[in-house]
Image (cartoon, helix red, strand yellow):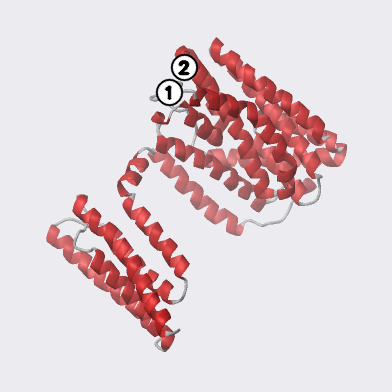
Amino acid sequence: MTADSMLLSLLVSASLGALIGLERQWSGQHGPGEASEIGVRTFTLWAVLGNVAALLSAAGAPYLFIAGFLAGTALLLVHHSILSRSLEQIQGLTTMTATLLTYLIGGLVAWEHTRVGVVLAVSIILILASKRRLHRWIERFTREDLHAALQFAAITGVVLPIAPNHEYGPYGAFNPFSIWLMVVLVAGIGFFGYVAMRVLGPRAGLGALGVLGGLASSTATTLACSRMSRERPALSTEFAAAVVLACSMMLGRGAVLCFAISFDAFLAVWPFLLVMSLPGVAYGAWVFLRGGRRGNGEPGPPVANPLSLKHALRFAVLYFVIVLLSRAALARYGSAGLLAVSVISGLNDMSSITLSVSQLVAKAQLLPATAAKAIVLAVMSNTLLKTALAFALASPKARRSILLVMTPTVALGFLAWWIAG
């Protein structure tokens, strides 16, 4: 490394350290409970220290960087202990952790991983600056939510590494690794919507409730909004729009699942899913962008945490059954049998059949066009079920609006199914 590149490395490291220190110093001056004595100068020096130690390690002292990190850790621990005693209260470890990471950032820049160092520095600044917002978000989760997430993460961390990735049983339908991987994929998408609903809260409005509810559970959103339309008939149009938006998001979720498993299946089905989603998206946009009520203060739908172990195991069993039925029907009755399974599966859950046929396409056991027909049939079956639920539970005005949108959705589905054939 030339002298000019070394100087540039030191300058970049010092700048990144200063930015992190600026956030810490500002928080110390404007936020109660923050350690304000560590700021711009200290973090700048830590970044430079890491950079110099890394340069010297590369120049012939290979253990200097590690020794510097260990010595710095010991120094910060002693400082933390003295500070806690002097203030007679336990101090947080956030600033100390950020300091050690700043040392490592200096090393990354010295080793010419500048882009990684910049990304890490920006990520640290965002995390540090979001303390109060993160705390407010976390407060919206229940103990059951956190327990379910931790339990699911622990089970997944144990199951996926040791689960055999081989097919067993009739038609090779039982693959432990594949089944649990599908559970993680579906639960992850659902949990994204669930977290967003929790974070935004009921003040997000019925439009956001429909979109995010569709990611978490379109069925639960349909049931909840249909019931609430009877309790608040003045908001029937907005509740109906939330229902059709949730059903439209279900189609987007199906496209994402296809893309994750088989790009060929995705290419075959996405135009049909896009066309079928147009009536719901257009109606929802018309309702919520024309200046209608936002629905602030309305309760969110009672959606179960998608990461609950009970929910995950139920989906795993359902997915295995659908895979078994799909392969058995395809082997015995050809594509006609598979399409019949799609209709039945769609009445309960669209994700299972979507993943199942996508895997068949990925293994070259099914044509992408046939997979597209199966997914479209499952969508139509699921849409008809939700329409029936809304018809039974919604207010008359919401019922009419939902029927007005769902009818062309199903009609477009039949057209897509005919074109795919």
**First-in-chain label (1 vs 2):** 2
Which picture quadrant has residue 198?
top left
Q: Residue furthest front?
A: 4
- Left or right of 253? Residue 368 is right
* Observer-nearest of 34 and 122: 122
Query: What amino acid is labelled 2 in the image?
Result: Leu
The N terminus lies in which quarter of the figure? Answer: bottom left
Q: Is residue 308 visible?
A: no
* Residue of label 1: 295
Query: What amino acid is labelled 1 in the image?
Result: Gly
Instruction: Give the CA separation, mark 1 to mark 2.
Output: 8 Å
Position of residue 349 measured from the top left corner of the image (x, y, whole percent): 65, 33
* Observer-nearest of 353 and 398: 398
Circle 1 Cα neighbour tier, 10 Å, few/some/many (<14 / 14–19 / ≥20): some
Which picture quadrant has residue 67?
bottom left
Q: Is residue 217 visible?
A: yes
Q: Residue at x 42, y 87 (%)?
A: 59
Q: Residue at x 59, y 27 (%)?
A: 282
Q: Residue furthest bottom?
A: 60
* Observer-nearest of 317 and 196: 196
* Circle number at residue 235: 2
Q: Residue at x 49, y 13 (%)?
A: 230
- Left or right of 24? Residue 56 is right
Q: Residue furthest top?
A: 396
**Relative height, residue 345 to residue 158 (above, below):** above
Do the CB atoms of the residues marked 1 and 2 lie less than 8 Å apart?
A: yes
The C terminus lies in which quarter of the figure? Answer: top right
Q: Secondary structure at mark 1?
A: loop
